[in-house]
């Protein structure tokens, strides 16, 4: 009888522990591409694509358009719109 009470007590302790610990939500580490659509023989990037990390094939001048998803906002979108226009104008020259 004493052993049965101990096992029941242990089971209750084990069940209570996970409930007492607050579960933390994992931080979103994905990045979103907010630059101009680029399509060539090497790669394809379009605005709104979500990546787990900045792709290695992305040229250095486009890396500024990769924004962490947690920091993406309408204000950031307006800033990046101006950057997109500047970048596209530089390509035309």
Image (tube, grey):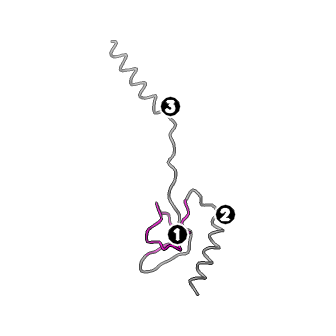
| Nearer-the-camera pick, 78 or 15 | 78
Magenta residues span: 43-68
Furthest residue toward bottom: 93
| Label 1 sits on residue | 63
Gap between marks 1 and 2, in whole Å?
19 Å
Disc 3 crowd, CA 10 A, few/some/many (<14, 14-19, 20+): few
| Label 2 sits on residue | 75
For the point 63% across and 61% down, which residue is it?
A: 73
Is residue 54 in the magenta section?
yes
Please, what secondary structure does the residue beneath circle 3 have?
helix
Marks 1 and 3, the one that precedes in the sequence: 3
In the drawing, does residue 32 fall left or right of residue 56?
right
| Label 3 sits on residue | 20
For the point 62% across and 78% down, which residue is it?
A: 86
Gap between marks 1 and 3, in whole Å?
43 Å
Marks 1 and 2, the one that precedes in the sequence: 1
Relative to residue 82, is residue 18 depicted above or below? above
């Amino acid at each position: 009888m004493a052993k049965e009470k101990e096992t029941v007590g242990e089971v209750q302790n084990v069940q209570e522990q996970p409930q007492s610990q607050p579960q933390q939500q994992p931080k979103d580490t994905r990045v979103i591409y907010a630059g101009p659509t680029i399509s060539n023989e090497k790669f394809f990037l379009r605005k709104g694509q979500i990546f787990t990390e900045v792709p290695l094939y992305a040229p250095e001048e486009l890396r500024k358009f990769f924004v962490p998803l947690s920091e993406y906002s309408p204000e950031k979108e307006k800033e990046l719109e101006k950057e997109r226009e500047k970048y596209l104008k530089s390509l035309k020259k």
